[in-house]
Image (cartoon, helix red, strand yellow):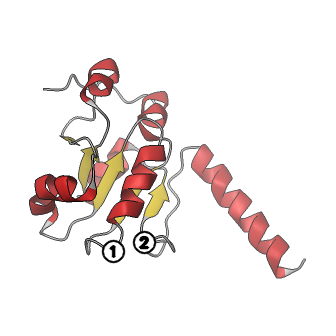
Amino acid sequence: MNMLNRRGFMMAGIGALAVAGIAVATTGPGPEGYEHLAMSVEDMRASGALVVDIRTPPEWAETGVIDGAVLETFAGVDSFLARVGPEIADGRDLVLICRSGNRTRAAAEALAGRIPNRIISVEGGMRRVLAAGYQPVTPG
């Protein structure tokens, strides 16, 4: 088996674990400067990270939110960091969640290199979290 096929086989295995809802540990930020990981709410809480739901207020109302998450729609790096920056000044990780993981990936990419914190985009977003059985709370 050549290196390319072996790497493809390993990546397929990691993808299968992520689809199954199993968090896949990595050793650091990916080449993009952030990580895109499947995480349960328990994993998010255990990490001590600041969890930020970047969806819009109508989306928060529609599905509910993760208890304790900061609700801050991502409308650009500068405005986002003005609100969230002081809360991660202690160096803790920043976990971003949206509906499906697409917006968090884009937001994480925009933030990469702008802050020293580890940035995690939650793969599958709230859809995956809710499908795993998490009971959200009504936004306050």
Residue highlighted by disc 1: 113
Q: Is residue 65 above or below residue 45?
A: above
Q: Amino acid at mark 2?
A: Gly
Question: Residue visible at 12% across and 68% down?
Answer: 89
Q: Residue 37 location, x and y as percent? A: 48, 55
Q: Residue 88 location, x and y as percent? A: 16, 63
Q: Quadrant of residue 115?
A: bottom left
| Figure quadrant of the N terminus | bottom right
Q: Residues within 10 Å of mark 2 (few under 14, many from 20)?
A: some
Name the residue furthest right: 1
Question: Residue visible at 34% across and 45% down?
Answer: 42
Q: Amino acid at mark 1?
A: Gly
Residue contact at pointers 2 and 1, CB within 8 angstroms: yes
Q: Is residue 126 above or below residue 61?
A: below
Residue highlighted by disc 2: 33
Q: Secondary structure at mark 2?
A: loop
